[in-house]
Amino acid sequence: SIKKEKPKRVAVLFASGKSITAETEKATGASLVKELGIIDVVASHIKPDQKDMKYIPYSLETLAFDNPDVILIVTMGKRSEVDENMKRTLTDNPAWANLTAVKNNRVVYLPNDLFLLNPGLRTPDALAELVREVYAINPIY
């Protein structure tokens, strides 16, 4: 259902109460993004010694430079702690407001049951959720 769509550029972030990092294709969200052929802006920043890591450091400055169309956020932990860390690390910074994804209200918190761990038999549901959130269309599968 997305073959005719212009590829979107996304960043998949992992936020906990302690830190915000970027997912690599070794993590569930970014691996599903890759499977759909969505452009993951984080991939170009992975260093050879990080190729086996699920999460890598990723600064707001790098995010601003990459300026993705959509920011996908996978969370772990108490939502209040995650929100506080997001506010402290990202949203309080003036650069955050200048991001295309933020300006277009395309910052998406992905459901934990599909993206925190491998969704297994619910993988088609996770892929459909990404298509809905990234391309704003209902997938046919």
Image: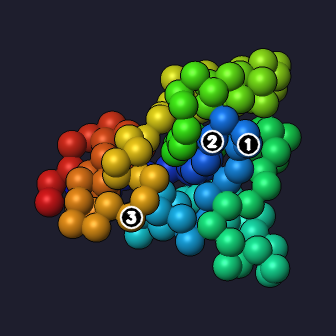
Q: Residue at x 74, y 60 (%)?
A: 56
Mark 1 vs mark 3: which is more N-terminal?
1
For the C terminus, give its image quadrant.
Answer: bottom left
Q: Residue at x 63, y 67 (%)?
A: 54
Amino acid under disc 2: Ala
Q: Is residue 96 visible?
A: no
Amino acid under disc 3: Asn
For label 3, the SS is: loop
Amino acid under disc 1: Ser
Q: Residue at x 33, y 37 (%)?
A: 136
- Marks 2 and 1: CB-CB under 8 Å? yes
- Marks 3 and 2: CB-CB under 8 Å? no
Q: Foreground residue, 140 or 126?
A: 126
Residues under labels 3 and 2: Cα distance?
A: 17 Å
Q: Residue at x 62, y 47 (%)?
A: 13
Answer left or right for 129 relative to 66: left
- Marks 1 and 3: CB-CB under 8 Å? no
What x and y, as percent, mark residue 47? Answer: 81, 74
* Vertical relation: 24 (above or below) 108: below
Mark 3, residue position: 118
Residues under labels 2 and 1: Cα distance?
A: 6 Å
Residues under labels 1 and 3: Cα distance?
A: 21 Å
Q: Foreground residue, 21 or 98?
A: 21
Residue 87 sits in which quadrant?
top right
Mark 3 vs mark 2: which is more N-terminal?
2
User: Given the current orientation, which residue lies at the most extreme right position?
Assistant: 61
Mark 2, residue position: 15
Answer left or right for 113 relative to 125: right
What x and y, as percent, mark residue 30? Answer: 52, 61
Q: Which mark is residue 19?
A: 1
User: Given the current orientation, which residue lies at the most extreme left position?
Assistant: 141
Residue 65 sits in which quadrant?
top right
